[in-house]
Image (spheres, grey):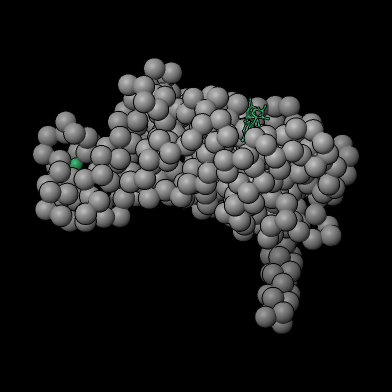
Amino acid sequence: MARRSSTRRDWDETDVRVRAHKSGSRPRTKDRPAHEDAVTGRVVTVDRGRYTAVLDEDTDAERLVVAVRAKELRRRPVVAGDLVGLVGDVTGAPDTLARLVRIEERSTVLRRSADDDDPVERVVVANADQLVVVVAAAEPEPRTGFVDRALVAAYDAGIDPLLCITKTDLRDPAGLVAHYTALDLPVLVSGPAAGAAPAGDGASLPLDRGLVEALRERLDGRVSVLLGHSGVGKSTLVNALTGADRATGGVNAVTGRGRHTSSSALALKVEDASPGSWIIDTPGIRSFGLAHVDPDRIVEAFDELGGAIAECPKGCRHTEDSPGCALDGWVARGRAGAAGAARLASLRRLLRAREGSGDAPEDKELGVG
Ligand SMILES: Nc1nc2c(ncn2[C@@H]2O[C@H](COP(=O)(O)OP(=O)(O)OP(=O)(O)O)[C@@H](O)[C@H]2O)c(=O)[nH]1
Ligand SMILES: [Zn+2]
């Protein structure tokens, strides 16, 4: 393995030298090979045209580098989670700027439209494996409309969703859990005594250690996006999982909560987890416009229902009122198994969420409307 890579490198260097010699001068910008010397970093946050990336992750040389986008990339959005090629000064020393010259192919793209009337879609984060939707059992009231819309965005993006219910010390979450049973969605619930657990430093912190550890396990080795309305306890969880509010050294101390005042997404390393475990916190996302989502993608996220699509009319929206939609017949014939009817009802609820306005009235609270 080692031998092979060193051979490969020799060949690359020779190749560059020969080409440079042949042309007699350095190639002009236009012809220059696509930055073979670029190093790859992970974008942790974006702020006013400055991209902060982590380089040499999980090595002694791990550092943060601030970069600006190269001219040729001006029109392409670069977001937290992106893997990018950097050239220039990549030392990460104070007041240095690298140049971001390449966006590596993304494994996933989580998108939202500003609202459903605005078809302009925005990339929220790149390369996430998991979407963690945080919702409180009470205070604030759970908004199932928001959760449903986030789930639709996850299914559309091919990202595994996970529901995390906080503040169960304030209300039994059974009703909320039941709402999602048919979705086959992993649900983590904080323990009944959450509010009673005192923090180590004596301050009273209503945080359930059990929930934090269960979540840490789920985050291990993956890149996870955290979404949730203000007040659900998202920051409390993120801080507990990343030590963002503690001086731990390394990435999190530099990008930590105290220094990060903008409302853009921020990637933080999960503490006490395998390399490559990241949380991407997304402050300030209150709604999830879904104008860009293809209903077929949502149906296909339900394995046992996806087969029905082939029998639907072209352009079928798969809702209750879609003429000729094959889903009803599919379930009636037992093709989706014993839970088929419940699964279809849940799927249709998500499809309705997709078609909803995304405004507060549609953003239903559990048991309201
Ligand atoms: N009772 C109870 N309170 C909690 C729990 N988790 C967090 N809180 C409290 O809820 C409040 C909001 O928590 P945050 O972590 O700031 O919530 P957030 O979702 O990040 O909200 P923003 O900071 O506004 O985005 C804080 O006062 C927390 O101490 C819980 O499990 N039970
Ligand atoms: Zn259909």
Q: Is residue 34 above or below residue 365?
A: below
Q: Quadrant of ligand 2?
A: top left
Locate residue 285: give its quadrant. Answer: top right
Judge from the rendering whether residue 197 lies leftward or rightward of residue 286; answer left or right. Answer: right
Locate residue 272: give its quadrant. Answer: bottom right
Q: Is residue 243 visible in the rendered structure shown here?
A: yes
Q: Is residue 259 above or below residue 125?
A: above
Q: Position of residue 339 (x, y in %)?
A: 25, 51
Judge from the rendering whether residue 329 lies leftward or rightward of residue 80; answer left or right. Answer: left
The C terminus lies in which quarter of the figure? Answer: top left
Observer-nearest of 208 and 81: 208
Q: Position of residue 279 (x, y in %)?
A: 63, 45
Judge from the rendering whether residue 16 lies leftward or rightward of residue 189; answer left or right. Answer: right
Residue found farthest to the top: 361
Q: Position of residue 110 (x, y in %)?
A: 49, 41
Q: Is residue 23 visible in the rendered structure shown here?
A: no
- Residue occupying the point 18% across, 45% down: 327
